Structures are given as structure tokens and as C-alpha cells.
Image (spheres, rainbow, N blue to C red):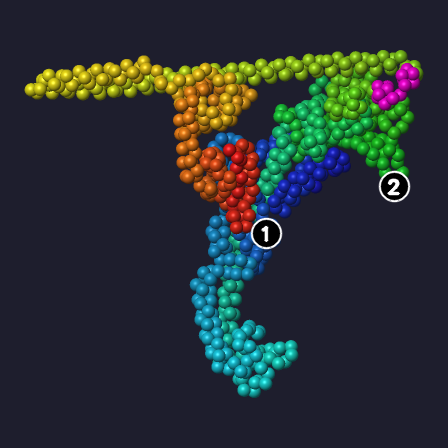
């Protein structure tokens, strides 16, 4: 039920369809009920609170993935427990699932970051109160809708053990009878009738086979007899079954009392779960629409940027820019039929209602929407056959009703104002109605065909013209809204393009007053100048984007060069440090030798050894400092191709080209186990001999990879961020190893990990296709990935 705004307005603007879409995103019936009862509010503070929690949910889903809020409404079961009635397995299992969902959501929210972006979700987390003890108790006792665990109580366990023993005795006795008296039996089997073990005896042996008859076949040829040898055992078994049922009833009664004791907490948890289900359903719808948070005001100011009607396909909807309530309070929209005037009215109205209902809207960020006391609508043909009202009468009846209730804090939307009657009188009435609404101060948007209203808007302060654009070349509307420019009729231009002769068109012009023709010429001139200005603005915008892109590219190059410079300096410092360390070690060794020579008799030999050591060290140092590398490289390449060996200047090592340069000149290169993008200016072509050696090394690397990379990876138990890091490296390794198909094991769980992996795989260039596993492959707990050819 829609509140605060009249239901007629909500229905005219199709707000009920938005409600149904949100309802479909809810997982629980209680969540769906909250969606149906969504409130269109008038208090800006309340609306902002709704938008706060909605956008926290959107942020949560973007960061952590979606959550399932599927649970059954168990309030009736709790009321039953409060009346001291016994809850049975099925009812207790549904309560347990609610408790499990509470625990699971507490787990999701437990790791929310410490920033302020999830303050309200944290409040909901605090409101949720897990009842772990009851959850574990039900889980340990109730196995299924028909079965209770043996360990539910010591007595139950003992009774079932005794039953098992009696059963074995009965079967052993009956098997003995079957083996010894097969001639008298119809079949050598044991069966049950009326809860007691029996054997099928031929009717003719009834007199010699002692026992109690419990049943007979339809033909009467077979009697199902309980042999006297097992009567006492069957009696004992029956008594044990009665005691077992009594103990089960006691256990269920105890569980039901536990539910009763925790009823208050459970009612609270169910309410919070339903509220969260509704909030996250709104978030899912917001993400589906690619909607943004509107900025709220109470001054009647609407400024929608690139607004889209949410019920029109994204492939066909044309975004509009529209504003009202700042420099003008009344907007008159003119233009051809099917040009988008009505859609514009509905877009403004529907997005206003969505905002007041605490929903994000399909428009660009920073779009502004006002909170209104009431939204009035007169859209479409609301003709009443029962009341025998014409279209004009129907619209007038509606407008009269609006004028009785409207005030300055209202939004009024009127389609084809004054239509359906004599054009002169209709135009006069339309201007008078607009005058009345304008004096009241209501924010009014009206569409019309009357040219008199265009002039009225030009002459009246606080009233503005707008038009829906029409392309005379294609004879089709563009659906763009142009504020500040009245619509041109285009009747003569359209007729001319459709083949009407120039003579007839010129004759028609003579029937139009000079003032009307002059007004149309002014509009034509304005339209021409607008298009020229629009083209100029477009060119300026393109140049500005190009300059920004060039500036950004230069900044990147500057940072890259600085990084390369820093790396070279650091490498040089490291080399110098090593040389100094080696020189110091050699010096220490020489000093030790000199000290040794002073004491030894073979002084000359030791000194000669020291001299040779110094000479050798100096030669090595000289080579380290001055000798260039033997590998020679050519100039900066004009182009490189896949598989080519290149020298990477910043890294001082060779690599293999994985893909040719992109538009920015960046080349993807493999250097050892590393893959990177390097600008072509930082590459050099390696001589053939070195290239062959590098290729051999790359081949060895690929062979080693293919022997070590597994055909599957297990990500169960990992959080999404860690899993994505591992799966990215694994896909790279598998591609390099030449694997065609790999398996990613993620388990079933909540589906968050699987959704995150799917999103990553969609954007990975090495992934050809992927799907969930089939029966025998791991089902939906695994994803099978087909890799591209190398």
C-alpha cells in the first residue's frame, strides 16, 4: 500500500510497477510484504535515512557480493509455542533455518571495515541477536521432518537399542520357522501387518500353524499369521515403541518450551531479517538500474541530469536533462506527437516518487529532487464511459480537483493541457490554468500543441519554454529535451519532404498571420544558432578531452622516467656498495697476509702472492666499471611482434613479446615469471644469437610450467580477495603451461565466492568460456574454465 501520496498519482506514474520489481528481488515473503507496503514519505530527514541505509547496502554488495535472505515466516509457529502447544519436526527445522540465517548474516557483517561507510548496517548487525544454544539444540536433535536423532536423550537412545535387540530376536525366530516349515508357507518371507511381524501361511495349513491371524490376501489363499513363538516379543516391541513415542513427545515439548522462552528475540530477528531483505532488494534494483543517490531539498527544486525512465529498456531510452524551481516555476513543453513529451512528464514524476520512497534514481550523480507535499498528475485519456464524459470533460474534472487541493509545496504534471476542445478556447483556458498555478507558486510542468502557450511562456516571468527535438531530415523525433527553446511546428518542412508542392505550401503561408510567421521564423533562427553553438561546444569538449588525455599520458611518462632514473641510481648504488664491500674484504685479507709475512721466513713469496691478489682485484674492478656487456642491441624498434625477444631497458634483462603494441604504445612482455606492460621506447631488439638463447630459455620455462601446473585449484575456505589473487596467478600459469581446460573449486556456500570468480573470469583475456560443473564434475561447487589458444 502506497502512503502519503495519493494512489491515483502513483498509478498514473506506474510507481506500482517499480514496487513489483523491487518485490521480485526480495527473498522472503515478509520482505515482499514490506516492499508492497513501501512508503512515499514527505519528511526529508526520513528519506535521507532510507537513502543512507540503501546506499550502504549497495556499497556492501559491490564490495562483498550479495546475500540470500530466504527464510520462512515462523511467527505462527512461535505463537503456537507460546500457547504451550508442541512444535513438530518441520516447524522446528524452519525455526532453526531462521536462527542459522541470523548467525550467517552476523558472520557477513562481522568483518565490516572500521570506516563510517557501514554505520547503519552495523546498527542492524547489533539488532540481530543470535540464539546459538537453541540453534545447536534443534540441529543436534532434529535430523529431518520425520526423524529425531538417537542422541536426543539417554532414554531415547536406550529404548531404540532395546528395540533393535527385540527386532533381531523376532527375525531370528521367524527365520528359524521359515526354514523348518517352508511347505506350509506361501512364500519364505517376513512381513508386517498392523505393526506386528507375521509370515504368509497357506490357508489349508491354518489348523496346524499356531498363531494369531492379522490379515489375509484378497483371494483368501494366504493368511498372515503371527506365530505364537513371537507373540510375547512383538508385545514387548510394541511397548517399547509406545515408550519411544512418549519420549519423542517429551523432547519436542522441551524444544517447544525453548522456542517459547526465546520468542521475543525471535520476533525481533524476523523483523530485522525482513527489513534487511527489503533493503537489499532495493539495492539489487538500484544496481540493476545503474541508479545513483539523488540530492534532497525541500525548496521545490528539481534538477535531473541524464535522467532515464526506469521502465523503458536501457537500449532504447533517451536520457533527458530537466530542471525547474530555481529561475522558473512553470515549464511549458511543446513538440510533435510521439516526441517524448509524455515520457518526460512521467520521468520527472516517477523519479520524484522514487526519491520520496527512499530509492536511488536512474540519473547522473548530483541530480537534485525536491520533497513535495503532494504530486498531482493529469496524464493520458481518463475518459469515463459510465459518466459519459468526453476526453476534455474528463481532463477538466481532474484539473478542477487539482486546483482545489494544490498549494505552493506541490508538483503538478499536466499532459496536453487544454486539448480536446476548440483550439482558441482551449489555449485560453490552458494559459489561465497555468496563470493560477503560477500565482499559487506550485511547480508545474505542462505539455501542449498550442503555439499561444509558447508566446505566453516567453512573455510571462517565471514561466519557461521547452521543446522535444525533431529531426526534419529523418522525419523522426530525437527525444531530446531542450529547455529555453519553444518547439517549432515543422508542419511546412515535413509536408515539403513528404512531397507536397511548393505552391501549396506558399499558399498555406498566406493564411497565417504575419505575426505568427515572424514568431516561427524567430524560432527557426534560434534553432539554427542553437545547433551551431552545440557543434562548437562539442568540438571544444573533444579538444578538452584530448588535451586532458595528453596531459595524463605525459604525467605517466614523467613518473615512469623518474622511476627508471631512481632504479638506475639505486642499482648503481647497490653495485658500488658491493664493490666497496669486496674491496674492504680484500684489503682485510691483504693486511692479514702482510702481518703473516712479517713473522714468516718465506716473506718474499707471501708478498708476491699479495701483489698478484691486488693486481687481480684491480683488473676485476676495472672490468666491472668500464667493460661494456658483450650483448649488443639495436635502436628503439618501430614495431615488435608476438614471440620476439627484446631487451627491457629499465629491468636490464631480456623478455619475450606476448602481444603487439596497443594504441598507447604499451607492449605486454614476459620476463621470467613476470608479465608486464612496457612502453616500446623502453625496448631494444636483441641480436639473433642472443634471441635464440632467450627463446630456448623461454621454452624451458614453458616446459617446466606445463609439468608443474595442476589442472585444478581449490579455493574453498578462502575470502574473496585472497581467492581472486590466487585464481588470477593460476589462470596465468595455466595459460602459459598450454592447458586447455581447468577446474576452479569454490564450493557452494553462500555463492559470494562463486559470483566474484565469475566476475573476474568475464574480464580475463585468457578465458575463452566458463560454466558450472555438471553431474560427476562437482556440480555447482566447481567452475569449468576453457582457456584461449596461445
Q: Which residue appears at 52% of the width and 37% of the height?
A: 787
Q: Estimate how packed mark 1 is, as few (under 14), some (14 to 19) or many (20 or more) residues with alpha carbons within 10 Å.
A: some
Which of the 4 image quarters holds residue 627?
top left
Q: Is residue 560 above or below residue 727?
A: above
Tell me residue 504's x, y (percent): 92, 18
The answer to the question of whether label 2 and label 1 lie on touching residues, with beta carbons closer than 8 A, is: no
| Viewer-proximal residue among 765 and 12 | 765
**Is 667 contained in the magenta span?**
no
Q: Residue at x 62, y 81 (%)?
A: 221
The numbered mark, 2 or 1, whose residue comes first in the sequence reads 1
Measuring from the top left, give residue 759's x and y in whole percent. 55, 36
Q: Relative to residue 318, is residue 448 drawn left or right? A: right
Q: Which residue is mark 2?
A: 386
Give me the disc on residue 74.
Answer: 1
Quadrant in which the N terminus is drawn: top right
State the residue at coordinates (63%, 41%).
25
Q: Label 1's element?
A: loop
Amino acid at each position: 500500500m502506497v502512503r502519503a501520496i495519493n494512489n491515483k498519482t502513483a498509478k498514473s506514474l506506474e510507481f506500482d510497477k517499480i514496487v513489483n520489481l523491487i518485490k521480485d528481488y526480495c527473498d522472503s515473503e515478509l520482505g515482499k510484504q514490506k516492499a508492497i507496503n513501501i512508503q512515499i514519505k514527505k519528511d526529508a530527514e526520513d528519506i535521507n535515512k532510507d537513502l543512507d541505509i540503501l546506499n550502504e547496502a549497495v556499497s556492501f554488495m559491490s564490495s562483498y557480493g550479495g546475500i540470500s535472505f530466504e527464510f520462512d515466516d515462523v511467527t505462527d509457529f512461535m505463537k503456537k509455542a507460546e500457547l504451550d502447544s508442541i512444535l513438530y519436526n518441520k516447524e522446528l527445522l524452519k525455526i532453526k533455518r531462521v536462527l542459522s540465517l541470523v548467525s550467517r548474516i552476523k558472520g557477513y557483517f562481522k568483518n565490516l571495515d572500521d570506516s563510517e561507510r557501514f554505520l547503519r548496517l552495523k546498527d542492524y548487525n547489533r539488532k540481530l541477536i543470535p540464539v546459538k544454544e537453541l540453534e545447536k539444540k534443534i540441529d543436534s536433535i532434529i535430523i529431518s521432518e520425520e526423524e529425531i536423532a538417537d542422541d536426543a536423550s539417554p532414554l531415547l537412545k536406550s529404548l531404540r537399542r532395546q528395540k533393535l535387540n527385540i527386532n533381531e530376536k523376532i527375525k531370528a525366530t521367524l527365520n528359524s520357522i521359515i526354514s523348518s516349515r517352508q511347505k506350509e508357507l506361501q512364500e519364505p518371507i517376513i512381513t508386517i501387518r498392523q505393526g506386528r511381524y507375521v509370515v504368509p501361511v497357506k490357508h489349508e495349513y491354518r489348523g496346524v500353524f499356531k498363531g494369531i491371524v492379522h490379515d489375509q490376501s484378497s483371494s483368501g489363499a494366504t493368511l498372515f499369521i503371527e506365530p505364537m513363538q513371537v507373540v510375547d516379543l512383538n508385545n514387548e516391541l510394541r511397548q517399547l515403541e509406545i515408550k519411544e513415542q512418549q519420549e519423542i513427545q517429551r523432547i519436542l515439548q522441551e524444544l517447544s518450551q525453548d522456542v517459547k522462552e526465546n520468542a521475543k528475540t525471535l520476533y525481533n530477528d524476523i523483523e530485522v531479517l525482513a527489513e534487511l531483505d527489503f533493503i537489499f532488494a532495493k539495492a539489487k534494483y538500484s544496481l540493476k538500474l545503474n541508479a545513483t543517490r539523488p540530492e534532497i531539498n525541500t525548496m521545490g527544486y528539481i534538477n535531473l541530469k541524464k535522467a532515464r525512465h526506469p521502465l523503458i529498456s536501457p537500449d532504447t531510452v533517451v536520457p533527458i536533462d530537466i530542471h525547474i524551481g530555481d529561475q522558473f516555476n512553470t515549464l511549458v513543453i511543446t513538440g510533435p506527437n510521439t516526441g517524448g513529451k509524455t515520457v518526460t512528464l512521467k520521468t520527472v514524476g516517477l523519479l520524484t516518487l522514487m526519491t520520496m520512497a527512499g530509492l536511488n534514481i536512474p540519473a547522473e550523480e548530483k541530480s537534485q529532487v525536491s520533497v513535495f507535499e503532494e504530486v498531482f498528475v493529469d496524464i493520458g485519456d481518463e475518459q469515463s464511459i459510465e459518466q459519459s464524459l468526453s476526453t476534455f470533460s474528463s481532463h477538466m474534472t481532474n484539473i478542477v480537483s487539482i486546483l482545489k487541493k494544490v498549494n505552493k509545496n506541490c508538483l503538478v504534471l499536466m499532459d496536453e493541457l487544454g486539448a480536446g476542445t476548440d483550439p482558441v478556447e482551449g489555449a485560453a483556458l490552458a494559459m489561465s490554468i497555468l496563470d493560477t498555478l503560477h500565482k499559487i507558486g506550485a511547480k508545474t510542468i505542462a505539455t501542449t500543441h498550442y503555439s499561444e502557450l509558447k508566446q505566453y511562456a516567453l512573455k510571462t516571468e517565471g514561466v519557461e519554454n521547452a521543446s522535444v527535438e525533431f529531426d526534419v531530415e529523418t522525419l523522426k523525433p530525437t527525444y531530446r529535451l531542450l529547455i529555453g527553446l519553444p518547439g517549432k511546428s515543422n508542419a511546412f518542412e515535413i509536408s515539403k519532404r513528404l512531397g507536397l508542392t511548393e505552391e501549396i505550401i506558399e499558399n498555406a503561408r498566406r493564411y497565417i498571420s504575419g505575426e505568427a510567421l515572424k514568431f516561427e521564423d524567430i524560432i527557426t533562427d534560434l534553432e539554427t544558432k542553437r545547433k551551431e553553438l552545440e557543434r562548437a561546444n562539442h568540438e571544444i569538449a573533444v579538444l578538452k578531452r584530448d588535451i586532458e588525455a595528453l596531459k595524463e599520458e605525459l604525467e605517466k611518462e614523467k613518473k615512469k622516467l623518474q622511476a627508471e632514473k631512481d632504479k638506475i641510481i639505486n642499482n648503481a648504488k647497490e653495485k658500488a656498495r658491493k664493490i666497496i664491500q669486496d674491496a674492504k674484504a680484500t684489503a682485510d685479507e691483504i693486511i692479514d697476509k702482510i702481518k703473516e709475512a712479517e713473522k714468516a721466513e718465506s716473506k718474499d713469496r707471501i708478498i708476491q702472492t699479495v701483489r698478484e691478489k691486488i693486481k687481480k682485484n684491480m683488473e676485476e674492478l676495472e672490468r666491472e666499471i668500464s667493460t661494456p656487456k658483450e650483448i649488443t642491441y639495436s635502436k628503439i624498434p618501430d614495431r615488435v611482434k608476438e614471440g620476439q625477444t627484446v631487451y627491457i631497458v629499465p629491468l636490464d634483462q631480456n623478455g619475450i613479446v606476448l602481444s603487439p603494441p596497443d594504441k598507447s604504445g604499451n607492449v605486454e612482455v614476459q620476463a621470467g615469471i613476470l608479465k608486464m606492460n612496457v612502453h616500446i621506447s623502453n625496448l631494444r631488439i636483441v641480436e639473433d644469437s642472443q634471441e635464440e638463447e632467450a627463446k630456448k630459455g623461454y621454452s624451458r620455462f614453458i616446459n617446466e610450467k606445463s609439468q608443474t601446473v595442476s589442472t585444478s585449484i581449490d579455493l574453498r575456505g578462502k575470502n574473496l580477495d585472497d581467492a581472486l589473487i590466487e585464481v588470477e596467478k593460476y589462470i596465468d600459469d595455466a595459460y602459459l603451461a598450454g592447458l586447455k581446460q581447468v577446474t576452479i573449486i569454490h564450493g557452494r556456500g553462500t555463492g559470494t565466492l562463486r559470483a566474484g570468480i565469475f566476475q573476474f573470469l568475464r574480464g580475463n583475456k585468457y578465458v575463452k568460456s566458463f560454466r558450472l560443473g555438471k553431474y560427476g564434475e562437482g556440480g555447482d561447487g566447481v567452475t569449468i574454465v576453457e582457456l584461449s589458444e596461445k
